[in-house]
Structures are given as C-alpha cells and as structure tokens.
Image (cartoon, coloured by chain):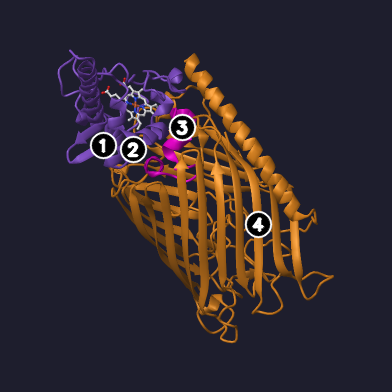
Amino acid sequence: MVRGFLRGAGSVQGSWLVSGVVTCTCLVVAMAVSGGRSRAYTAYSLAVHKTEAIPAFARKYGLRCSACHTVWPELNAFGQRFKDNGYQLGNDRDSPMWQSPAYWPIAMRTTPQWHLESTTHQITDAAPAGKTLRQTGFDLSGVDFLLLGTLHKNITFGLVPTLDADGTTGLEAAFVRFDNLGQSPWANLKVGKFELDNLLSEKRFTWLSNNGGFLYAYHFLPSGSANNFGFGDNQIGAEFSGHSFNSYTRYSVALLTTDDGEPGLPGGKSMDAMFTLSQAFALGGGLGPQRVGVFGYLGHRPTTFETVSGTAIPGTGTDNKSFYRIGATAQLWLGNLELLPLVSHAQDDAALGPGPDKPTWNNALLEAHYVATPRFMVQGRYELTRMSTQGDPATPKSLGDADAFAVGFRYYPFMISRDGMALHGEFAMTRTTGLAPLSGDGSGVDPADPATKVWSRSLLLAFDFAF
Amino acid sequence: MRPHTRWVAVASGWGVLLFAAGVTRAVAQESHIGSVTGHAPAGRPLYERYCAGCHGDDGDARGENAQWIDPRPRDFTMAVFKCRSTPTGTLPTDEDLFNAMTRGFVTTNMPPWVALTPQGRADMVAYIKTFSPK
C-alpha cells in the first residue's frame, strides 16, 4: 500500500509540474495576444449547463471517472449502460440502504477560467457602422449541483439546481425514473425535467468556450423565428425508454410540454413528441462499440392565447403550428480515435416564421476526439448550418448560415474515484452570415448588411473540476 | 572440448532457454474465448482505465479503492479464483475469467462489464493472466 501510495504521489507531483508549466505558458501567450485591450461589455451567453460528470457515483461504487467516461464528462459504453439502467450497476450497492448513512448523493462542478472573446461587425454607439469588440479576463462559470442516484432499487431520481456566476439560480433537471418495469430493461419511465435522449449529448460534451460550448444543430433558429425550441435545452415531460441487456440497442419516446423546458406552462395544451433509436456493434478493436442512431422531434407552438388586459394567460395557447427536426448520428471508433458525425434537417411552420414560406434548414457536423489515454485527449469539430428556405422570400437565402470550428485539449492530472479535474484549453471560431453568432459575444447585435460575415472567436483556458 | 565449441554449446543452451521462455510468455499473453483471441498488450490500457482502481496497477488488489471495499477485490498475483469450471486448486479457463468479468458479482463491488466489447474483455483476460507466474 505504501509503495503504491508513494508511486501515485510521485506521478501526481510530476503531472502537476507539467500542467503548471503548460498553464503558465499558455496564459502568458494568451495575455500577450490579447494586448490588454479589455473592456467590459455585458455579453449575454447561451447558458448551456454541462452537468453530467458525477463523482458522487464514483464515490458510491469505488469506480474511477474513466470507468464510465471516455474522458469525463463524455460517457463510454459502460457509462451509457449505467445511465440507461437508472444509475444502477445491477449489484446490491445500487440500493441507498446499502450506503453508509453519511453518504449523500451530491457532487458539484465549476470551472474557473481565463478567456478571450472577439466578434467583428458589432454596432456600438460610437461605431454605428460596426467594429470588432474584444473582451478578455479571468472569469467564472456557474456551479452545477448534481444530485442524482436511487431512491430505492429501480427508482431513480435526478435534481440539478444551478447557480450562474452572476447569482441567477435555475433548475436544470428534476425527475423521477421507474426502472426495469416488469423486470425488463426494455421498459423505463421518466417524468419531470430532463435532457432529451440525445446520442450526441451537449450536456456531457467536452467543449466549454462561448463559441465552442454548444451545437448550432441543437440551438439554431432562423431569422425572424417565433419558435423557441432547442434540442440542447432540457425539456419537461415523460419519457418511455428501453435498452437491451448491454445497452447496445436503445430506444426512447417522449411526450413533452410545448414550452422548451420553461416551468409554469407558458405554452399551449398540445404535446411535443420525440423519438430516438440507436444500435451499437462490437466491431473493430476500438475503445468502444460502433454506434449509429436516428432521432426525430415533432413540436408545436401556439399562436393565439386567452388574455387579461392584453397579457397572455399561461397554458391557454391554441392555434398550434408545428415544426420538426430529424437527424442521424453515430459514434465510431478507430483505435483511440473517436468520430462523432451528425446530420439534421429542420422545418418550422410558416406561422412560426417571418413570412409566407416554411423556414427550412440543414446542419452537418463532424467531431473527432483522440483519446490518447484516460487522462489526455485532443479534439476538433467542424459544423455547418445552411438555410434552404427563408420564411420571407425577400430575405437573402444565406442569412443565418453558420460555420463553426473548434479545437482543444483536456488533460486530467490524476484519475481517482473521489473527484476529477481537467486542465482545459480550447479555441473556437464561428462565421455567421448577416446575424450575430449564437454565442452572443460582443454586443450581440446583428450587422446592418445581411450579407456581412461576422467572425467570432473564443480562446479559453480553464480548470474544470467536479467533486 | 575446444574452447570455441564450449562457447557455442553454452550460447545455444541459453538460446533454447530464451526461446522456450519467449514461447511461454507469448502463449501467456493471449486468451482464447470462442473465436475471439485476446492480446495482453491491448488489454493493458483497458485494465488501467477500468480495473486498476480496485485490482491495482500490478494486479495485487492494492488499487486506491481496495481499502474501502468489502469483500476485497481479487488479487490476480495469487491466481486463486472463485468462479471456475476447473477443479479446486487449479487455474480457471480463459472463458471462466471472461464470464466472471462479464457478469460481475452481485453481492460485491465487482461490476458487470458486459457493455465493453467482447474483444476488449478478452484482451483484459489476457492481461490479468500476466500478473501471475502460474
């Protein structure tokens, strides 16, 4: 034991030295690049809470992060099965009664960071024709409180309150799940607010910067849209799902309220529906099985409300207009190289857009991770979004088109079963046509000319930790 | 015996020994489960990722979690196993190890590793066999 401990401590010290030197070098270079031209603008951000790397499970079962994650927070096949089984391994450690009374299923995650944002063609009071805005400095992410586990054998719960760095609180997830109904893994029912069963999860992905930390595929809406749906937003409803014993075959169907996860029934009385289906194959000698999947979402948004003194009464929306999203994705392994392609097609009813036509667009992305070891990975992503029909025929066809590119690395100085830390470096860049980027950096104002290409860049160095 | 003849004899003796050791080692570094052949070098990074926290980097059941776990994880250097199709006191077959690892042990912390690919599991069986001289 002593030998093991000392050896472990030595390697940890060595890794700390390396990470310290790397961090300092990167910080110095980045600060020199930024030239100290920092100005405080109030940037709104697309607050994508990346919630799900949960050391409470590691503590409960005595498993290292690397058991469930390729690199945390991304799940590997073992972690996917654990999640599908209601955060249960299938042994008698699953029941809360087995745990020491001192065990509390809570973990927290936050990310102190230094970042630089720059966006071109931003209209300000002093520059009505637009200028490049740059923001830089040390900053904080919010805090995610991750309370997930079992209430009883085969009854799972999830509760994720969030605290943004500016003090805003939120409820990211709150659900109960009845697992293995009739002793079958094919029948599980979840009710509450939860992440959609997205095969390429934005909650568990390895990107954090303002321009890289979300997918256009999950949040893009065309110019003039009255829709508010985002695949990446947790939704409120009920999900029925199932999987084979090893979780290689998976399906889910869900009924969701029509309000994009906003509580208090602000939408109408109809329901949205979502389905996913995926199949994994044990092919090749890669780090995991090869998985392919399809997904679809049929949604509605009301266009008329009962009102009092002109104010809409929540939940009374009628005159529903529909929209849909369909797509396909995969998780492929070539040795330690992971490829994550996704294609999707989207259409909204004309009544949800600015004109007589149905806004229609397509999206494609390819993400690649090289998982050198459970403690080091490098990654890249390219994503493009193209409008195929604008709601208003007078709008230029390319308005809203986006190209997003990102590269980065994550280095985990140690790998144990109590907590986790990653040194995270990322550079992300987007080019949007005629619209401010979704990241909302700079002043977040659309350029005057719809043909203008707006470039937005993020450079991020962060200490991402969860315990 | 002329000096150089003795030298040749000694060298070839060592050669035979080294060859034999090499063959034994090569055989020990493989596992055979049905049509799947596991390779110890490929199993090593997987073992470190999934198993070492309990079973220890050296297979000696001294992973950092072992002290908190009851019953203790199996010490692979002892080569004594519970689930065997073979007589007591003998080694289990590759298939026994593969099945034990796939199923896990319901009353212990040993999880079922069924979600990993059969190739990955076979590679790890080959690797855990290298911990024991038997």
The residue most toward the right is A126
Helix, strand or loop for disc 3: loop
Q: Which residue is nearer to you in this view: A273 or A291?
A: A291
Q: Chain of mark 1?
A: B
Quarter holding residue A412: top right
Amino acid at dot 3: Arg
Residue located beneath label 1 in the image: B38
Q: Which residues are magenta?
A: A58-84
Q: Which residue is mark 3?
A: A64
State which chain is coloured orange.
A
Quadrant containing the C terminus of chain A in the rendered view: top right
- Report the side of A194 relative to B22 (left or right): right
Q: CA distance from mark 1 to mark 4?
A: 44 Å
Q: Which mark is residue B42?
A: 2
* Helix, strand or loop for disc 1: strand
Q: Position of residue B33 (x, y in %)?
A: 20, 36
Amino acid found under the numbered disc labelled 1:
Gly
Looking at the rendered image, the disc whose residue lies closer to the viewer, 3 or 1, is: 1
Q: CA distance from mark 3 to mark 4?
A: 31 Å
Q: Work out how far the residue at label 3 is from the one at label 1, CA to CA, in angstroms.
A: 24 Å
Q: Is residue A79 magenta?
A: yes
Residue at label 4? A458
Q: Chain of mark 4?
A: A
Give me the residue at 24% from left, 21% from top: B11
Residue A72: say if magenta: yes
Q: Amino acid at mark 4?
A: Ser
Are the residues flagged by discs 1 and 2 in contact, CB closer than 8 Å? yes
Separation (CA) of disc 2 from disc 4: 38 Å
